[in-house]
Amino acid sequence: MNRIGFDSLDIDLVSILIGCLLATNGNIGAAVFAMGQGALTDIFSAGWPGISSLLYMTVFFSIRLGSRFFDLHSSRGLLILVFLAVCIKGLLFAALLYTLSPRLTFLQYPFPALGVSALATALLAPPLFYGLTTLTGPFGREADSAE
């Protein structure tokens, strides 16, 4: 498994949370979360400024535009949209590294690792969405009864 780079399996929980926020809270909450998470990642990392914000906003826009074709509230639609968003994010990151890096050092086989990471992230999206909506159920009912 080390030969094709599966030792660095990347489960992207932020992409799942962006999809869940888009399904439950709408565009504004998910966009603020994506931009805030990207800004925090940029602040606390040693990478190029703005690259994480760009990547997470790309995830937001790809899920948002893909929700026109797939139902974001169904488990199949969420799985497909998260898979596509993580693939687009990974390809954009690889393209940015390729164009902006002064020294080209990449994994020998990055695409199988990207595919497996995107598939693992997408398979985790529906159970996490169900868990988060179940968890917020009692709190949402308390907020409705208080008004």
Image (cartoon, rainbow, N blue to C red):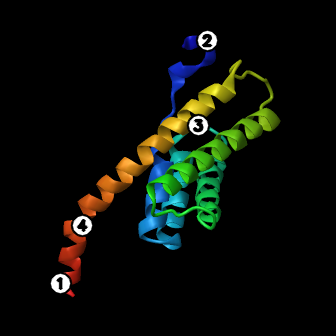
Q: Would you name the residue on which mark 1 appears?
A: 146
Q: CA distance from mark 4 to mark 1?
A: 14 Å
Q: Earlier in the sequence, mark 4 or mark 1?
A: 4
* Residue indicated by mark 4: 137
Describe the element under mark 4 as helix, strand or loop: helix
Specify which label sits upstream in the sequence, 4 or 3.
3
Rendering quarter of residue 86: top right
Q: Could you tell me if the residues under marks 4 and 3 are in contact, i.e. CB atoms within 8 Å?
A: no
Q: Describe the element under mark 2 as helix, strand or loop.
A: helix
- Who comes first in sequence, dot 3 or dot 1? 3
Which percent across, then down, holds residue 20?
44, 59
Q: Nearer the viewer, residue 80 or 87?
A: 80
Sort mark 2 into few (<14), some (14-19) or many (20+) by Cα contacts within 10 Å. few
Marks 4 and 2, how far apart at CA? 45 Å
Is residue 9 something that shows in the picture? yes
Quadrant where the C terminus is found in the figure: bottom left
Which residue is depicted at the point 25% across and 72% down?
140
| Residue 46, label in figure | 3
Closest to the observer, 79 or 145: 79
**Disc with the residue nearer the chain's start (4 vs 2):** 2
Which SS class for mark 3? loop
Q: Identify residue type, mark 2.
A: Arg
